[in-house]
Image (cartoon, grey):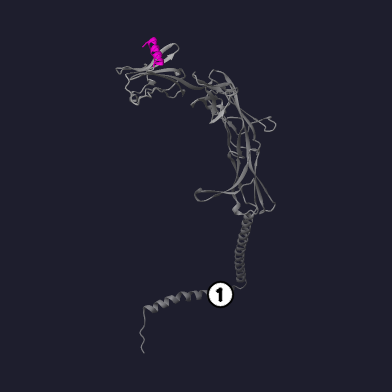
Amino acid sequence: MNKKQFLMILGFALVFEGAQCKENEVFVAHGSVAVLPCRDETSAHSHPTAVYWSRIVGNVLKTVWRREKSGLEFRPVRDPPRVNCPVPNFGKADYSLHIAETTIEDGGKYICEVEGKNRMVKVINLRVVRASFSPAVVVEGLRTEATCHVSSGTQSVRINWKRNGKLTRKKIFTSVSQKDGGDWTCQAAYNGGVVEATTSLQVKGIVTPQDDSSVVYAALGSSVSLPCVFTDGLIPYTVMWNRTSTTSYSPLPLPASFHESAGPSASATIQRVEDGDEGMYTCSGMTKGLNGESKKVQRTMELVIARVLRSSSSSGNGPVTLSCHLSNSSHITSYEWLRVNYGPNDTQTVTSVQKTKSFRIKEVNEKDAGEWVCRYYGEQGVLGNVTYELHVMGAVKSENSSSGNKTAMVMGLGFLFLVIFLVLFQMYRNYRRKKMILLYPAMETIVHQAATEREKRERSRPKMAEDCARDPKPVSV
């Protein structure tokens, strides 16, 4: 069917009573499936002889899909085809056209013509809503603009932008930040409904942390990581770390155990946090965009050091106060003291003791020795912990151990002195004995002979008893 013939048919359809002609608008988001309605409201069942779908492009009428009286179908050659008119729906008087993966170029006027008992002609204006950024990939700090394009039509459309479910009026970004990256939704409201189209903005630069408000907390003596993660496009060997004072912003040297990584993750590590390492740390590097332009991006973060301060009286078992101290406590909302006990198989039990900045132990004893933890909180929850090991050296434990040691020492020395005394006394007796022998040799001889005889008698007694038992002699009465 050529253009003149079709326009003649359309004109007659608009004039004569036997034809029906209606025009409506269909809104659809870019990339979704568009359904152009074409139903015969006069009959629940229809038996058409031919269905024609055409589109007006400029001054040219192009066939989109058609089915002849013979049942032969014609459709554009495409793999896979995006346009389809489901034939099984014809029995329900539904001749709607389905367009998959709709693009902004698909917008425009479509004409549905059905030949059956009656000739039905419908005009549908497809309006495609597309959201986009120009450019869609941008280095942080540069400019981009959001655009919501709607195909032309007769109805007025009200455009709004949504970000994370909230309406926003921001369309032009003079200096893009990492927080601007992600999905943005264009909301097109018209008389009869709302259509939403979503687009994504990719921001190159430092993705972690996203801004200069980052604060890193670390306990004194521990290891800490300072995050600095770049997106793709980082120019190698351009990453630098600097440190400045929190108050005067004057440059300071990096800590002795400071170590920085290479690659997209340019994060740094302080192996052991020492007193005085707090301050502002800045990570910077050059990033290249899609168009070849390069820009320096940087991120500043604050390192806050936490420690436990102990104050006690001069007496060994007097009160002890443990205080949680941070180099900058402006973001701290509350503190909590925890007691950590260890049981069999390294089981750990954590008990909350008190929710204050300082904790006072009135009288220190052995059960207070061990691990104490100060946990500090911010508006977003737990910010960090600092551990303190309480050693009970000069208190009750020391007194008990010292008194026990003294008792054992006294007893040991007493036993040693007794042994020495007995040894010396025995030596003295031997000495006196030898001295007496030298003075009275005859008496020593007599004593020696008496002792010898006594020893012989004692040896002979068992032998005589044995002989008597072997040979008993008869006795006559």
Q: Nearer the viewer, residue 4 or 319?
A: 4
Q: Is residue 175 above or below residue 302?
A: above
Left or right: 375 as drawn, with respect to 111: right
Magenta highlight: main SS = helix
The residue lying furthest to the left in this view is 70
Q: Determine the residue positioned at 50% across, 51% down.
A: 344
Q: Is residue 5 magenta?
A: yes
Quarter in which the C terminus is drawn: bottom left
Q: Is residue 235 visible?
A: no
Q: Residue furthest bottom?
A: 477
Which quadrant of the view contains residue 439?
bottom right
Q: Looking at the picture, which amino acid does disc 1 mark?
A: Val
Hey, which quadrant is residue 218 in on the image? top right
Magenta residue span: 1-16
- Element carrying mark 1: helix
Point out residue 445 in the picture as x, y percentages from the top left corner.
Answer: 56, 74
Looking at the picture, how far across and down is residue 281, in whole percent? Answer: 63, 31
Q: 432 or 16, which is in the foreground?
A: 16
